[in-house]
Image (cartoon, rainbow, N blue to C red):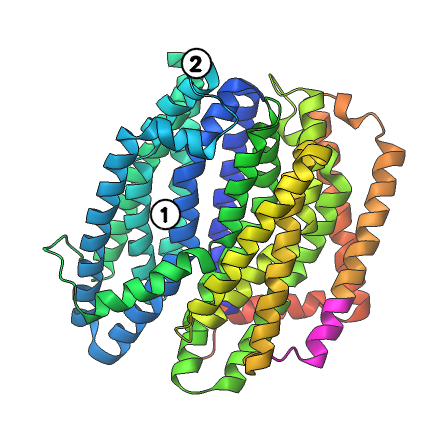
Amino acid sequence: MLRNFLTVGGWTLVSRVLGLVRDQLLAALLGAGIAQDAFQIAFRLPNMFRRLFGEGAFNAAFVPLFTEKMTLHGASAARRFASNTMSWLAIWLAGITILGEIFMPWVISFIAPGFGAGSTRFDLAVTLSRITFPYLLLICIAALLAGVLNGMHRFALAAGAYVSFNIVGIMAIILGAHVFHMPAQAASWGITLSGIVQLGLLYVAARRADMKLHLQRPVMDGDMRNVLRRLAPGLVGSGVTQLNLTIDTMIATLLPAGSISWLYFADRINQLPLGVLGAAAGTTILPVLTRHHAAGDREGSRETLNRAIDYAMLLTLPASFGIIALAPEIMSALFGYGRFTVQDASFAAQSLRAYAIGLPAFVLVKVLSPAFFAQGDTKTPVRIGFGILALNLALNLSLYRPLAHIGPPLASSLAAMVNFGLLCWLLHRRGAMRVATVTMRRLSIMLGSAVIMAVLIRVAALYFIPDFMFWRGWARIGALGVMITSGAALYLACLQISGVARVRDLVAARRRMRNPTP
């Protein structure tokens, strides 16, 4: 499980780093204004579908059934099941795409109520959204192919294909700015083109894995009804985080121009550890928990959850506290160029700190949700999900006026903490989760080490680089790199001294993963 966790996390990290480059280009060329706000709204809806299907509900509904079909009935039955599911998915999503293109002005009025119909920002958002909307059809079918590969334990092939999204996006933005002089429109076309590339790569990978899927006349059989029963509630149960972020965006449209952009760039930094660690944990733990549940091995399931929590928090806690400590420096060094001003970087840093407070909870929700899905229980997460959505909306409405651009991300963080607490309590009550004493001890030491690291690097930043945001670009990047490296070394030293993670043990574990025992 650790090897698969690191494989998916490694590929996701590559994708996130390339995504950071893409976002830097967007910040420098569009700044934080009308064009940026319109583009982010155009990207929000299809991107939400990507995260829901690519990292959440579809995996939860499809992968366990595909794995079971593969194990009990063989590759041929699994292939027929996957082809039928893909055919239904294509018909359903094609219909949504056509309706979305026709009624896009009404869609934008709903998800961006603060834009105002007829305004320049509203009209631009409608135009860009019509360009990006077909991406949801392409990426959701690609997610099915990725689920097939994950079900066959070919995690690297599935995770690697998503890197192409940012490669195509970077090329589109550069061409749009320097050749066509329309960066927002070019960036929108890049999203849809990247969906075509991702779908093509995953289709080829599935064929090479001897899983040749094809569109057919769909049949509503028992297997498909089972998928739908699991999928519908799972969309809310595992997608609460993304739906909460969408609510944040809707509320942000009621704030001054630029607020959507500040929230977006803050969320992108927060998504780096969340995507790498949360998505990797959720993707790799589900097949393992499914096997334990099928075998009636409750103790094995509990041990798997303990290990997954340990692995995820080992890096999430220092990431969270490190981001809180260095948020102004991070936003300035990464995005403070071109049209993205010092004030933009400062406001985005405030939003980033609010997101980072809830980062451990965001990740742990992704770790715990598969424990329900592995048992075929999607009703419990959906009940919790509806409550969390209502809570997040109430918090947003309470906080967005007094705290402005800090309110929506803080509301999401608080809602994520409540979500984690409820999932943890229910799993514990069912006997599906028992946090071991050794795990609690390790988590306490990790937390203490992360706090010590954050305090020391914040003090160092204030003392050594007080005028950091006004330095030249490469100097800012270099200084930030030194601060992050120093913080990582300090955190690792604390873990070494406490015995939680010794360097020689990490090296030995890496060697065992490269040369697994038969």
Q: Which residue is found at the position 41% from the left and 71% from the top?
A: 287
Inspect the image, locate mark 1, and give the three-letter code of the amino acid beneath it. Answer: Ala
What is the spatial separation of the Cα atoms under label 1 and label 2, in whole angstroms?
A: 27 Å
Q: Are marks 1 and 2 in contact (CB under 8 Å)?
A: no
Residue 486: percent from the left, percent from the top? 77, 46
Lower position in the chain sequence, tag 1 or tag 2: 1
Residue 436 in the magenta stretch? The answer is yes
**Magenta segment:** 434-444
Mark 1 is surrounded, within 10 Å at the Cα level, by few (under 14), some (14 to 19) or many (20 or more) other residues, namely many
Mark 2 is surrounded, within 10 Å at the Cα level, by few (under 14), some (14 to 19) or many (20 or more) other residues, namely few
Q: Which residue is found at the position 60% from the left and 70% from the top?
A: 424
The residue lying toward the viewer, choosing from 515 and 368, is 368
Residue position for label 2 = 178
Residue position for label 1 = 161
Q: Which residue is found at the position 72% from the left and 74% from the top?
A: 440
Q: Is residue 237 above or below residue 168?
A: below
The residue lying toward the viewer, choosing from 82 and 105, is 105
Tell me if 387 is positioned left or right of 234 in this view: right
